Amino acid sequence: MITFRKSIRIFRWLTVNLNGRSWSITLGARGGPRHTISSTGRRTSSMDLPGPFGWRHNHRWGRRR
């Protein structure tokens, strides 16, 4: 199975992510809080914590048709 994934950093705090089915925009820098908005309606907030810990919250807005 062949997959496609590409991340394009526009600014230090803005990244556009592309794959075969959808696209997403990530706001925030590494090491701090990040918010991702996907074309499929998924919104994710995440943050790296010290050590092997991390925090992530997913929320889906609406349904994909």
Image (spheres, helix red, strand yellow):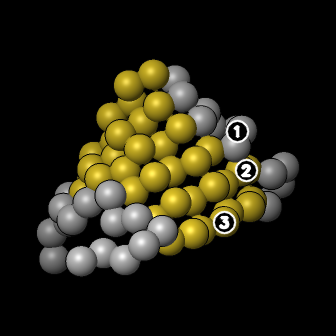
Q: Is residue 20 left or right of residue 62?
A: left
Image x and y of residue 41, in percent: 40, 65
Image x and y of residue 9, in percent: 39, 30
Q: What label sits on residue 17 in the rendered view? A: none
For residue 51, above or below residue 7: below
Q: Amino acid at mark 1?
A: Gly
- The span from disc 3 to disc 1 (Cα, nearest Å) is 16 Å
The reply to whether dot 2 and dot 1 touch (C-beta < 8 Å) is: yes
Disc nearest the viewer among 2 and 3: 3
Q: Secondary structure at mark 1?
A: loop
Q: Which residue is mark 1?
A: 31
Q: Which residue is mark 2?
A: 48
For residue 46, above or below residue 64: above
Kindly identify the residue that appears in the image at 61 percent across and 33 percent down.
29
Q: What label sits on residue 57 in the rendered view? A: 3
Q: Secondary structure at mark 3?
A: strand
